[in-house]
Image: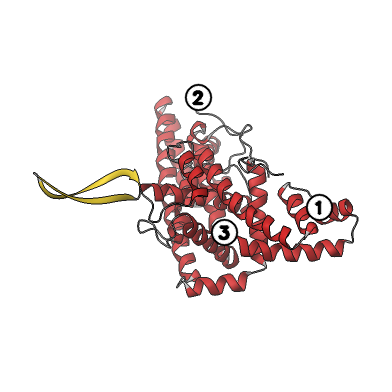
Amino acid sequence: MERKKSQDPPFEHYSDADKLRYKQKVLDISEVICSDDDIMIKLMDYTLKKMRYLARYDSINGMEAQDFIQESILKTVEGDRFWQGETVKELLDHYYHIIPSLIWNELKKTKLVVTINDEFGTRKIYSDKFVRHNPAEDDEKEILDIVINETDTSILDNLIMQEIIKKTESCIYNELEKNEDYIGLYLYEAKINGEPNPHKHVAKELNIAIEDVRNADKRLKRIINKSKRF
Amino acid sequence: MKDKNKIYPYEKQINFIRLIDEAMNENLDEIKKELQETNIDIKEVQKNLLEFIKEQKARLLIEEGKLFNQDFREGKSKNTDPEVINNLVVAFRKSESGISGNNLNDDEIKSLALVKKAKNKFSGTSDEPRKKDS
């Protein structure tokens, strides 16, 4: 699942024929994704939760969750959010990864409309400064400042994703620590670090039965589902 | 202790995404219910997105046709021999009407190979490795 950034040339260096093949591949796999009920339920829920977290609304500038999924497909097809993978799972990961930053980009377009009355009459002006619907909480300020002028899409995707991970992880760690669920904690770290066989790895590390790890996995999934509002 | 400001590498972010996706599998019924309460009809969403993909595929076909046409014209301008061009057209027509290679003469078979090569270039069936434009 490595990002093959160094192996393949960037999209803009592809020949016309390769661009066509790439677009065809993205559309074919996207078709599989969109035809799968369970995948779509998860993708819609994920997108909606990210909209609510980043904008606190189910619609931004008239764009709803479905529109962001559509945009993620289009941006990938056009190479604006270049994808280097081959499988349904990899493309789905890619969509999960870029959707938060597409929402963020749309949110940045939101402008404050001010009605002014001067010697030229009454008119509307649009402030260039992005204004949130609700004031940002202190801990949100950092990421908002970092990405406001960001133009490199892959860096932007990573930054926004990291912000979401940070928030979700904080909830997961708090919950695991509160319950003194150290098996769950080890398991979470093992999965995040990409251990090929996390259950076996944790059982060996903690010298416990694999059944205990499986039970911890169920608890962990419940906690993740509770924490994924970000 | 975790460094809160550290940005995970892409692979680790993807591991996190997969963890979230895996957890959602355990909660699908609940998620489905929540979406229904938000008045989201998944079937309708799927229909709209599949329609969108269909439109994009149609655009791709047009794009492919334009490139094929351009490629063909370039090839034609390089080879001004009227016999070759005639063979190419006849071979192409015969191949499009599903006439088997047995009914083509040697020149037509050679020309047909050229047409197939040009078609493969844009249809995604080429085995050639990816090349840069430059």
* Residue A142 located left or right of residue A180: left
Q: Circle 3: is it few (<14), some (14-19), or many (20+) Cα within 10 Å?
A: many
**Circles 2 and 1 on the same subunit:** no
Instruction: Check contact, mark 2 vs mark 1: CB within 8 A.
Output: no
Circle 1: residue type: Asn
The x, y position of residue B57, in whole percent, is 46, 52
Circle 3: residue type: Ile
Q: How far apart are marks 3 and 1 (CA)?
A: 26 Å
Q: Distance between the residues labelled 2 and 1?
A: 44 Å
Residue at point 43%, 47% (across, down): A105
Labels 3, 1: front one: 1
**Circles 3 and 2 on the same subunit:** no
Query: Could one spot residue A209 in this view of the protein?
Result: yes
Residue labelled with disc 1: A197
Residue situated in front as seen by the camera: A164 or A1:
A164
Element carrying mark 1: loop
Circle 2: residue type: Ser
Element carrying mark 2: loop
Q: In which quarter of the image is the C terminus of chain A?
A: bottom right
Which mark identifies residue B134? 2
Residue labelled with disc 3: A33
